[in-house]
Image (spheres, rainbow, N blue to C red):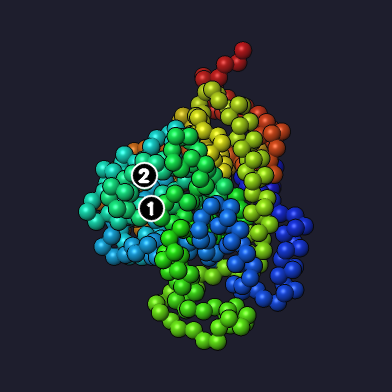
Amino acid sequence: MTTPQFRISELDYDQQELDAVVEVIKSQWLSQGPKIEQFENRFAEFVGSKRALAVSNGTAALHLALLASGIGPGDEVLVPSFTFVASVNAVLYVGAKPVFVDIVGPHDLNIDPVDMAAKITPRTKAAVVVHMAGFPADMDAILLLASEHNLVIVEDACHAVGARYNDNPASPLSQKMAGTAGTVGCFSFFANKNLVTGEGGMVVTDDPEIAERVRLARSHGMTKSSWDKAAGRATDYDLIDVGFNYRATELTAALGLIQLEKLPEGNRRRRECVARYRERLAGLPGISIPFADRLDDSSHHVFPILLEDSEIRAEFRSRLGQRGVQTTFHYPPVHLFTHYQKACPDTPPLPQTCDAANREVTLPLHARMTVEMVDAICDVICEELGALTPSQVNHS
Ligand SMILES: *Cc1c(COP(=O)(O)O)cnc(C)c1O
């Protein structure tokens, strides 16, 4: 196999990350300690949240967010199906029931507040809201529903680190960072995200009680950590609830501190590339671009396009691959996976989700991309799409 010339995502690491890891190794303290605390403080400051708690990954963040918000057996939780499976698996971890909600449509791939309202029952206690591709969902409408129905809102902001709710300048949320509007916000620092530590995650909240429950539950339910003991802050500990081992390491915190500094510039470069993609692809027959009327509010985690004809997707992706352009797709609908067909057999059709999922293709986008690279990719797209849909192309 040849490596693609244009990869779907690429690491933005340099000597700074190498130095940061070496420093941690020389310190000889590798498990949760002072670097984690520093990373948490900087991250809380960056997103504008009172508390931030580092955990081992984004999935653990979602699990602890639901758990610490008191969601459990007998509760229904509204979730999109158009998401990564972890957003929904976390609901099952706490013993609650996922209730799948459709997305708005091909122009807006986020959860639809109208369909959310239609699916609320007396048992609905929470919603997991995903900010797809880095575009914040309609939090004004969602927070209104939450206050009317007393819902916990967990924001799955795994795509949206650095995104802002500035779609509507009249909104009280305007300019706040994604992840800070709901009850709890969850982030992932997996290897393909905008802020990368390999594995890693963060829970943010303004609620001190939720923060304290997350802090305990990420480390077995123990009241003191090994670092507290090593630093002379504690000699013994109590166990007040059964928790998990969802701790992150000092190595990932050191990487996270560097990556957080790079994030604004990386997101700016992503935005520049998205603007160029849109210039080149807008109006091209056979393609439409979701979220096309929004640019500044997104963290641009990925760049999704929708083909007009779902039948050509496999061939289109294969032709791009042969010409060095790696693609992927987001996401196979969660409610159609075997497990969820069994676990949630009463899910009604989600027509917008299925339509978008059948036609979506994700193009390369990362912080190291240039507009010249976007141009080269768009040249390939224009040629291959033209060859696949000859009747629609104007050869003048
Ligand atoms: C990556 C991702 C997660 C899970 O994060 P991990 O760190 O891989 O556990 C959850 N939800 C969404 C939308 C994601 O993209």
Asked where in the image residue 324 lies, by quadrant, the reply is: top right
Q: Which residue occupies 55% across, 87% down? A: 235
Neighbours of disc 2 within 10 Å: few (<14), some (14-19), many (20+): many
* Horizontal arrangement in the rendering, residue 258 relative to residue 193 (left or right): right
- Does 271 sit left or right of 311 as displayed? right
Crowd tier of the residue under label 1, counting other residues whose Cα lies within 10 Å: few below 14, some 14–19, many 20 or above: many
Q: Is residue 342 left or right of residue 213?
A: left
Badge 2 marks a residue whose secondary structure is helix
Question: Would residue 358 appear left or right of 20 to someone viewing this image?
Answer: left
> Which residue lies at the image location 75% right of the left edge and 55% below the top edge?
14
- Amino acid at dot 2: Ile
Q: Nearer the viewer, residue 384 or 141?
A: 141
Residue at 24% x, 56% y is 123
Residue behind mark 1: 153
**The C terminus appears in which quarter of the rendering?**
top right
Give amino acid for label 1. Answer: Ile
Q: Is residue 248 above or below residue 81?
A: below
Disc 2 target residue: 142
Return the x and y of residue 48 as percentages of the image width and height. 53, 52
Does the CB distance between marks 2 and 1 fall below 8 Å?
Answer: yes
Residue 145 seen from this side: yes
Label 2 within 8 A of ligand 1 by Cβ: no
